[in-house]
Image (cartoon, grey):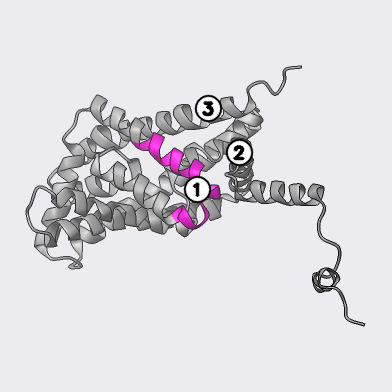
């Protein structure tokens, strides 16, 4: 006997058609999957990452930090090469500054320890558990990573100056970048460092759920830092250390005129404007009621 069309369609579907309640539940699941993650989910993801970093042994932090310091040199190298080969035009800095993003791409995608990232990730666990033990652990991580980053920057600066890896014309572009980093006074460098630390920490906040957009988030944020000449303590240290190694600036000027104010500014920008504010906006009202 021939099966009715409706029954045939039902059998082909493998069961009865979904009820209105089942359709609504399916639509809600799809809406949740397609919606952006809440701030609380991002916060928890960064806390988990920060806790993992605080548990890493000091030796592992040092080698990862050294790798990051070495890798950050590619920001200056790429920018200097672009400046050398691009024509001398008013738009040249807008294109050459794309090279500034290269070091950050290598460090972040390679999961290397960069000091300015750590103004956010380990701070959130500390704000959750404000104990002396956690504070000492954050101090341990900061000290090791900062020292290793600066050591890597110094090693590359000396290599660039004393080994024939680059043509004199390219080294002249590196010197120009270093002079640009050192041209401001202490206060101006510090303020520019606040903006750099603010933007890098915001980038770290955006990355956990950027998914396929991670690459573009890194490029766009760090490009703005580069084109605005905001003072990033590690990327800028490669520049001023190279200038000092060339004998075109004193080591005291490089440290006191750039590294110290940029470091203070990066800490203020990352810690106060991103870590503390995002912690406050997520945890505010949790203890009420």
Residue 167 falls left or right of residue 160: left
Determine which residue is flagged by label 2: 38
Mark 3 burial class by Cα count in 10 Å: few <14, some 14-19, many 20+: some
The picture places residue 63, in percent across and down from the top left corner, at 48, 56
Specify which label sits upstream in the sequence, 2 or 1.
Answer: 2
- Which SS class for mark 2? loop
> In this rendering, does residue 129 appear at all?
yes
Outermost top residue? 289
Q: Select label 1 or label 3 by which is in front.
A: 1
Q: What stretch is highlighted in magenta?
A: 196-214
Residue 81 in the image: state x and y as whole percent: 18, 60
> How far, Cα to Cα, is label 2 from label 3?
18 Å
- Residue for badge 3: 276
Quarter of the rendering occupied by the N terminus: bottom right
Which residue is labeled 1 in the image?
207
Between marks 2 and 3 in the image, the one whose residue lies nearer the viewer: 2
Labels in figure, total: 3
Secondary structure mostly taken by the magenta-highlighted segment of the chain: helix
Q: Which mark is residue 71?
A: none
**Which secondary structure, mark 1?**
helix
The residues tagged by marks 2 and 1 sit, at their Cα atoms, a distance apart of 13 Å
């Amino acid at each position: 006997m021939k099966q009715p069309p409706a029954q045939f369609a039902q059998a082909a579907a493998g069961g009865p058609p979904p009820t209105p309640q089942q359709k609504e539940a399916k639509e809600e699941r799809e809406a949740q999957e397609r919606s952006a993650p809440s701030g609380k989910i991002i916060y928890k993801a960064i806390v988990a990452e920060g806790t993992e970093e605080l548990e890493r042994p000091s030796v592992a932090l040092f080698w990862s930090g050294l790798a990051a310091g070495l890798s950050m040199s590619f920001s200056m190298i790429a920018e200097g090469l672009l400046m050398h080969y691009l024509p001398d035009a008013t738009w040249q800095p807008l294109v050459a500054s794309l090279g500034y993003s290269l070091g950050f791409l290598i460090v972040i995608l390679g999961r290397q320890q960069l000091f300015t990232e750590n103004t956010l990730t380990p701070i959130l666990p500390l704000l959750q558990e404000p104990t002396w033990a956690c504070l000492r652990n954050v101090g341990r991580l900061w000290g090791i990573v900062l020292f290793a980053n600066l050591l890597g920057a110094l090693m590359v600066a000396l290599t660039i100056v004393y080994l024939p890896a680059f043509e004199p014309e390219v080294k002249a572009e590196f010197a120009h970048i270093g002079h640009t980093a050192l041209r401001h006074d202490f206060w101006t460098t510090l303020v520019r460092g606040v903006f750099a630390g603010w933007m890098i920490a915001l980038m770290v906040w955006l990355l956990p759920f950027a998914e396929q957009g991670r690459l573009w988030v890194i490029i766009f944020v760090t490009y703005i830092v580069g084109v605005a000449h905001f003072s990033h303590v590690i990327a800028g240290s490669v520049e001023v250390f190279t200038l000092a190694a060339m004998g075109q600036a004193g080591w005291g000027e490089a440290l006191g005129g750039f590294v110290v104010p940029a470091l203070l500014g990066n800490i203020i920008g990352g810690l106060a404007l991103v870590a503390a504010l995002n912690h406050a906006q997520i945890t505010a009202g949790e203890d009420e009621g």
